[in-house]
Image: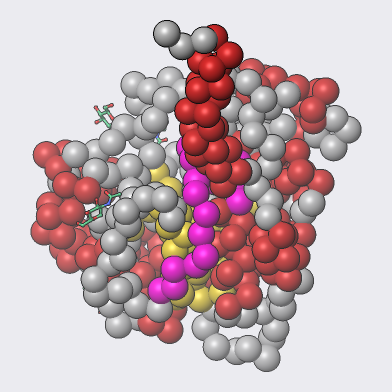
Amino acid sequence: MLSSPLLVSLTLLLSLPLLFLLSQHLHLLTPPDADDLALFRRAGWAPHTTSHLSATPKIAFLFLTNSNLSFSPLWHKFLEGQTHLFNIYIHADPTQPITPPDPPLPRSIFIPSKPTARAHPSLISAARRLLAKALLHDPRNHYSPLLSQHCIPLFSLPFTHSFLLSHPHHSFIEILSHDPNLHARYLARGGPRAMLPQLPFSSFRVGSQFFVLTRRHARLVLRDVSLWDKFRRPCPSDDPCYPEEHYFPTLLSMLDPHACTGFTLTRVNWTGSWDGPPHLYTAPEISPELLHRLRHSNSSHVYLFARKFAPECLPPLMDIADDVIFRNSTIGHYFLLSLI
Ligand SMILES: *[C@@H]1O[C@H](CO)[C@@H](O)[C@H](O)[C@H]1NC(C)=O
Ligand SMILES: *[C@@H]1O[C@H](CO)[C@@H](O)[C@H](O)[C@H]1NC(C)=O
Ligand SMILES: *[C@@H]1O[C@H](CO)[C@@H](O)[C@H](O)[C@H]1NC(C)=O
Ligand SMILES: *[C@@H]1O[C@H](CO)[C@@H](O)[C@H](O)[C@H]1NC(C)=O
């Protein structure tokens, strides 16, 4: 029979590997690391686009993913023959078995990445890494749309580019101050005790984590230390807490509200969802009518992107891509709408 001290030692010994694994995992999810800090600091002072760079401003597509980019054939079609208009940066969770697109997306770079988790500050850090890479890599990167593996384009690239170019000084980021969950979210982040003095509840905002930031705003975000210091800490309780939906809207509404439209350009369907994940479109739902419907918004602009689509939507989307998504004939109409 085992004596109890022996049993205790044995239990301790057996739990050591588990403790080690757990601490490794927590460690991996806890920003910031010195290399992140150095990257953010450099990028915050990356050059502005200067006037002598008379060449076309580019869109830096930022893909933040923890699985395969299933829609890469659709994005290939979107990007075809337009390589002067964009760069692509991909942050792929290194703990997931992710196969890079084959063939690779044109002008794309997989950036050094770290593990990410939903409703966790690691998503903020990943978005900041992407913004930083785009700022440092090419001074012509002027707009940075953040996308995920579930996002699709709703228009052609030339349309998308001219739409953004017609609003050169505005970021498209949703900023809401009257969401019914807002106060509970503030408390879930630790409330006044954790957030004051930098962030009183009256300044706390929420919005979609999918945004398009101008280069100027990307630099502002990377120079921010004090608010990031509040948001980079893991949520203190088990209550719903989505730091990635608060950090960017709150920061930009404090720093430069007049250069933010307050709208996202990424359509999502929240029907039938309460504080849970949004509707995931499946293959039978894909139709030209759906795609036309997804473009329309209640504001003066259109939606350029939509989510969330299951990987099985790829074949029906490819079938209608040329005739519906990338077709130019309706563009004049939408473009005029967007300028009203
Ligand atoms: C990505 O695709 C590969 C090959 O098709 C597959 O083995 C892998 O499990 C996929 N990864 C994820 C995260 O689904
Ligand atoms: C939104 O999702 C619901 C199901 O949750 C669906 O019935 C509805 O058609 C969707 N709306 C659009 C515009 O796709
Ligand atoms: C526009 O507003 C109407 C009425 O409030 C709502 O039913 C609809 O879902 C909104 N559409 C979009 C795209 O947000
Ligand atoms: C759409 O217009 C762009 C230029 O504005 C052109 O390069 C592209 O080939 C056109 N696409 C189609 C499907 O006509």
Q: In which quarter of the image is ligand 2?
A: top left
Residue depicted at x 54% and y 17%? 6
* x and y percentages locating residue 128 in the rendered image: 61, 56
Residue 122 seen in the current view: no
Residue depicted at x 12% and y 55%? 315
Give 269 or 21, whichever is nearer the viewer.
21
Corner quadrant of residue 253: top right
* x and y percentages locating residue 113 in the rendered image: 51, 59
Give 28 or 294, whichever is nearer the viewer.
28
Among all residues in the image, which is located at the extreme front?
Answer: 1
Q: Is residue 329 above or below residue 26?
A: below
Give the main secondary structure of the magenta stretch.
Answer: loop
Residue depicted at x 58% and y 69%? 133
Corner quadrant of residue 155: bottom left
Residue 74 seen in the current view: yes
Residue depicted at x 52% and y 65%? 112
Magenta residue check for 133: no
Q: Which span is picked out in magenta?
A: 108-125
Q: Is residue 291 above or below residue 336?
A: above
